[in-house]
Image (cartoon, rainbow, N blue to C red):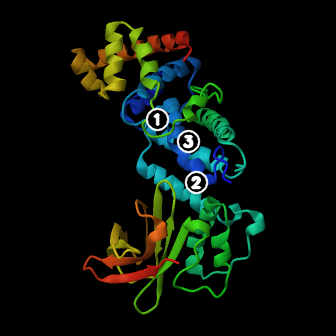
């Protein structure tokens, strides 16, 4: 009899979780190259000692715990500060059912809350840069300011966004 | 605050590049936390690239090796050097099927060059590519999963250039899986397939002129 609450093999573990684990890492580092490296590191670290007799929930919990360690090491190596983190309990929803590439992300809601709390020009510069992928020159042109002014505007907007992020507890 | 390095980090984030490393202070960390939250909301990059998923799978399969099979089911394996890579893949796949049937089948020293025995339930099927004059040119592994896929490697060939793999199904039809390049007579290829692997009969490698370079029979 096959236990449907357990994975049959490492390949099932991989197929079921790679998409979601990548999304979690991407949400924590904000760029594809690092998200791919960290996702790889989690699987390469976790799959060896993994016990296939464990339930799916236990396997996912183990993956999340490994992810937390891998992400913490990443920040220690790159910036010397834990910029973002993974909480195996609070972030359990990332690896929970349902699976699939159409899994909704809460990233737009999180970003929306931050942007909504900013003055118009601060919000606009950050939308142009982070959501619309504009270069600083393009953003300056769109806002009809000099490139230097756009840089200052972006910096001030990010400082305020950081304060809002703290207040929101994100 | 370390302004220039912080700006460079943010520019990389916006551009989708890997940001550089530096010693950030607490204020930088707070700004970067907000920047990452905003960047993660941009549509597109939140979904993993298909090629990344396939490549990582392959690396994990290569690293899994025979030692990941259940210890009680492992038997000594002595194989021709050319099959070592396939055994590594197949042994990883043994774990997939929860059985060591492939390992056991490969443990025989009187291994037939044509094909090896399929494990229970046809979870994995393997075959050996041979040229018309009987030279072993590579191996193919088909795996039933969600999705199912095939992996093949070719070595020791004199052929250079693009080669197409065609799968033969037991109802007589042929399905082209895809094309890949042989360089220096070697190459690898993997692809998801829609075919029921239990119904696969064999595979052919066909050159750009339509000539069959090698063929394999699934056990």
Mark 1 = which residue? Answer: B19
Left or right: B216, with A16 as reference point: left
Query: Which of A108/A128 is in front?
Result: A108
Displayed quadrant of residue B199: bottom left
Task: Residue B186: tell me if it is visible.
Answer: no
Q: Left or right of B140: which side holds B66?
A: right
Secondary structure beneath dot 1 equals loop
Secondary structure under tag 3 reads: helix
Which residue appears at 46% of the width and 42% of the height?
A33
Q: Mark 2 lies on which chain?
A: A
Residue at figure coordinates x 66%, y 39% from the top left: A66
Q: Which of marks 2 and 3 is in front?
A: 2
Question: Horizontal and vertical percent for residue B90?
Answer: 59, 68
**Residue B35: where, in percent of width, then height?**
45, 23
Please say if the residues under marks 2 and 1 sit with CB atoms less than 8 Å apart: no
Q: Position of residue A162 (x, y in %)?
A: 49, 15
In the image as oriented, which residue stretches furthest toward the top?
A: A119
Residue A30 is left or right of residue B26, and the answer is left
Q: How crowded is mark 1: few (under 14 residues within 10 Å), some or many (20 or more)?
A: many
Residue picked out by circle 3: A38
Relative to A38, say whether B56 is above or below: below
Circle 2 residue = A11
Q: Quadrant of residue B121?
A: bottom right
């Amino acid at each position: 009899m096959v236990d449907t609450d357990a994975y049959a093999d490492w390949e099932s573990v991989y197929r079921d979780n790679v998409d979601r684990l990548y999304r979690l890492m991407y949400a924590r580092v904000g760029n594809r190259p690092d998200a791919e490296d960290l996702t790889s590191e989690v699987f390469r670290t976790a799959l060896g000692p993994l016990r296939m007799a464990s339930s799916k929930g236990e396997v996912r919990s183990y993956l999340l715990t490994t992810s937390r360690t891998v992400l913490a090491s990443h920040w220690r190596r790159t910036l010397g500060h834990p910029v973002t983190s993974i909480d195996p309990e609070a972030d359990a929803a990332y690896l929970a059912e349902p699976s699939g590439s159409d899994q909704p992300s809460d990233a737009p809601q999180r970003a929306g809350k931050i942007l909504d709390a900013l003055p118009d020009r601060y919000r606009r510069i950050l939308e142009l840069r982070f959501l619309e992928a504009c270069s600083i020159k393009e953003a300056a042109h769109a806002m009809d300011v000099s490139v230097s002014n756009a840089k200052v505007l972006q910096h001030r907007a990010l400082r305020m966004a950081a304060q809002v992020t703290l207040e929101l507890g994100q | 605050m370390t302004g220039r390095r912080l700006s460079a980090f943010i520019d990389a984030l916006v551009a989708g590049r890997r940001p550089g490393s530096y010693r950030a202070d607490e204020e930088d960390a707070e700004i970067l936390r907000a920047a990452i939250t905003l960047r993660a909301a941009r549509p597109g990059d939140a979904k993993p690239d298909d090629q990344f998923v396939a490549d990582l799978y392959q690396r994990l399969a290569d690293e899994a090796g025979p030692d990941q099979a259940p210890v009680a089911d492992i038997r000594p394996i002595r194989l021709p050097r050319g099959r070592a890579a396939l055994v590594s893949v197949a042994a990883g796949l043994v774990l997939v099927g929860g059985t060591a049937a492939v390992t056991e089948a490969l443990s025989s020293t009187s291994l037939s060059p044509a094909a090896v025995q399929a494990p229970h339930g046809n979870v994995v099927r393997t075959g050996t590519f041979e040229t018309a004059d009987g030279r072993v040119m590579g191996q193919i592994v088909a795996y039933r999963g969600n999705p199912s896929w095939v992996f093949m490697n070719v070595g020791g060939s004199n052929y250079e250039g693009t080669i197409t793999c065609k799968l033969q199904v037991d109802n007589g039809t042929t399905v082209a899986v895809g094309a890949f390049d042989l360089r220096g007579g070697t190459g690898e290829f993997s692809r998801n397939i829609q075919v029921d692997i239990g119904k696969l009969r064999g595979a052919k490698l066909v050159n750009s002129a339509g000539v069959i370079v090698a063929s394999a029979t699934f056990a």
